Image: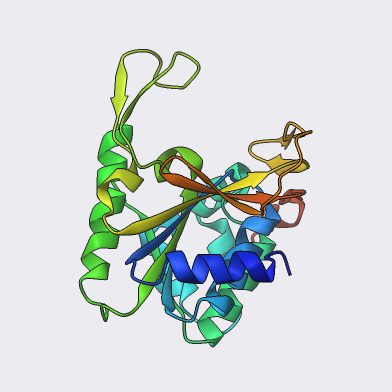
Amino acid sequence: MFLTNKTTTKLSKISQDKDYLLLGEMHGVKENALLVEELVDKITSIKTVGFEYPNEIESALNQASPFKKELLDYPPVQTMLKDGRFSQTHMDVISRLVKKGIKIICFDPKISSTDWNERDKGMAKIVMSYRKKLNKNTKILLICGNMHSRIDEFDLDSSTEKGKNYHYRPFGSYLKNQINIKFNYLSGQFYNFGLKKFPTDPEPHKNQLQKNNKQWLLNIKIANPTRIDNYKKRPRH
């Protein structure tokens, strides 16, 4: 669908003995969910998929039957529809994965603190706790925002919500024995509190999958945005 045979073979090889396949995304792209599904289909050792979703909706997502519409009225889900983490495409993909026997975990913790470091530490705690329950020959595929997926700690610049002098330890830095991949969209649009464009990359890429320091880049030609038009609150009767 999206992945070439060469890319699939390479991913299978480099992830063979890893515990985690960690994917970094720009929220609000339909292909994010579709790529997750394709990776699960092609790397058979993936038996668990984790999303950056509130932990309290995990049981609802693991129902193979169609989702209850009431889930869409849940305030955290409404937020995710707006920031692009959740969409009709995601719902369809998750439903198909569950029917195939894939376990869905939601690793966004419910914490009172607004501190990013506390949130990312909580995310890692949920995932690592679940990893201990799994057979060592299986792996977990995880997908989250690009910033959370980074491997090394870093200082945030003034363009972020936290501003200057904030030392950030991302979720990805806690996970050992991982393959780290960033979805690198070369053109197209995404939905994150509004419709936005990716800058077009004029450089030709010889390989769909390429190494960039500690991270792999998965180059995808075009991104199509998620939408929230179908998720307007329904009137109460």
Seen in the image, is 44 located left or right of residue 169?
right
Q: Quadrant of residue 120?
A: top left
Residue 210 in percent (x, y) is at 57, 49
Q: 207 or 43, which is in the foreground?
A: 207
* Coloring basis for residues: rainbow
Q: Is residue 64 visible?
A: no
The outermost residue toward the front is 206
Q: Decide: is 173 above or below 46.
A: above
Question: Quarter of the image holding residue 4?
Answer: bottom right
Query: Residue 211 location in percent, x, y?
Result: 51, 47
The answer to whether 197 appears left or right of 49 in the picture is: right
Q: Is residue 46 visible?
A: yes
Residue 160 location (% of width, % of height): 47, 21
The image shows residue 59, relative to residue 79, as above or below, that is below
148 left or right of 222?
A: left
Where in the figure is residue 100, as x and y percent of width and height? 53, 87
Residue found at x 64% / y 39%: 192
> Which residue does the image show at 26% across and 69% down from the upper left?
131
In the image, is 52 to the left or to the right of 78? left
User: Between residues 73 and 212, which one lies in front from this camera angle?
Assistant: 212
Image quarter hosting the N terminus? bottom right
- Quarter holding residue 38: bottom right
Q: How many marks?
A: 0
Residue at horizontal 35%, vertical 47%? 172
Quadrant for the C terminus, please: bottom right
